[in-house]
Amino acid sequence: MWFPGHDTYCKWLVGNLEDTSVAFYTNWDQRREIVLRKGLKGMPMGYGQSYYYSFIKEPLTLDFSKEP
């Protein structure tokens, strides 16, 4: 189920540490095509490589098989 801002969240999840002009300011429909062509395995989350950008530096694992 979509929620307000899901496209921005999706773009952050597949940011690949790219510059915000490439990853953030691109329409999600256009960005999705690029991401699906490249594949998701090993793709970093977030934007940029400077201290004031938003990205995850260490590996992150989400386990949705367990209930809270």
Image (tube, rainbow, N blue to C red):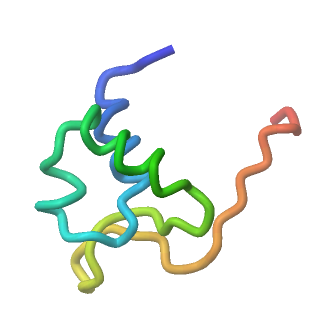
Q: Nearest the camera: 32 or 46?
A: 32
Image position of 49 (left or right of 21):
right
Count of numbered circles in the view: 0
Quarter of the figure with residue 61: bottom right
Image position of 45 (left or right of 4):
right
Image position of 44 (left or right of 33):
right
Residue 52 screen position, x and y as percent: 22, 78
Please report the residue visible at 36 percent of the width from the left and 60 percent of the height from the top.
15
| Extreme residue in the front direction | 37
Please report the residue visible at 48 percent of the width from the left and 71 percent of the height from the top.
56
Quarter of the figure with residue 30: top left
Residue 11 screen position, x and y as percent: 34, 47
Please report the residue visible at 86 percent of the width from the left and 38 percent of the height from the top.
65
Q: Nearest the camera: 23 or 68?
A: 23
Instruction: Note whether 41 is above or below 33 in the view shown.
Output: below
Task: Point out the image quarter for the C terminus.
Answer: top right
Quarter of the figure with residue 17: bottom left
Instruction: Note whether 17 is above or below 2 in the view shown.
Output: below
Image position of 24 (left or right of 1):
left
| Extreme residue in the top direction | 1
Please report the residue visible at 24 percent of the width from the left and 85 percent of the height from the top.
50
| Extreme residue in the right direction | 66
Residue 63 screen position, x and y as percent: 79, 48
